[in-house]
Image (cartoon, rainbow, N blue to C red):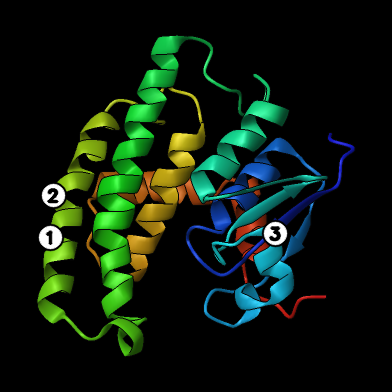
Amino acid sequence: MNTKQIILWGAGTSRTIRPIWVAEELGLSYKLKPIGPRTGETQTDAFTEINPKQKIPLLQDNDFFISESLAICRYLINQYGSARNIGAPICAREKAREDEWLSFIYGELDETSLYVIRRHEALAPIYGEAPNAIAAAKSYFQKHVSVAEHRLKNRRFLIQNKFGITDIFLTTCLAWADGCQIELSPLLKKYLFNMTERPAYKRAKTQNTPKIMN
């Protein structure tokens, strides 16, 4: 258990749940400031002072601040992880494999597919309706998620047959896709079910529900 003051800023999205889930898996003591995106809370002078990007999630570990869900998750694992929960890669090849999968998941599934759908569905009043872009993004997601499906045919987890950060990122993308009514294969549905049955995920999901900030 850590003894430092860890604060996680942000709740309510597929990206904010990632560092919360990591913190829960690691058994960390932390305080959550459940501010939401596009609520005005990230545009306040106080928040802008600590994160000029005006984005969530954000991690504060005493006097250290870092944003971006991937960077936050990696920091928590590198700083507080261990072999008994989630540890950092133990060699260059394992780190390279982790980088490969995280780059693929974030680049192809999150940003290129799912966030395009979010922009033109939930955020259509801001970015405009674009049904062709949505249809293309859903097709693109299904094409590229098949790579993860192939990887998982004979294994429970993506890397070293051990739960890790790549599983957290893939699971949050699959849950996001499911919420967008993107059809998942039986194998991916089973994987998603198994991941979301983890006690730490359930706690993180509850925490990730937006609340009024204290």
What amino acid is at disc 2?
A: Lys
Q: Quadrant of residue 176?
A: bottom left
Q: Residue at x 84, y 35 (%)?
A: 2
- Residue identified by numbered label 3: 50
- Residue identified by numbered label 1: 139
What element does badge 3 sit on? helix
What element does badge 1 sit on? helix
What element does badge 2 sit on? helix
Q: Position of residue 157 (x, y in %)?
A: 41, 31
The correct choice, above or below, for 31 with respect to 130 in the image is above
Using the rendered image of the protein, determine whether residue 123 is visible from the camera's viewpoint: yes
- Residue identified by numbered label 2: 143
The correct choice, above or below, for 196 with respect to 49 in the image is above
Measured in 3D between alpha carbons, the distance from the residue under mark 2 to the one under mark 1, in whole angstroms, is 6 Å
Q: Position of residue 139 (x, y in %)?
A: 12, 60
The correct choice, above or below, for 100 with respect to 184 in the image is above
Q: Position of residue 37 (x, y in %)?
A: 54, 74
Which is in the foreground here, disc 3 or disc 2? 3
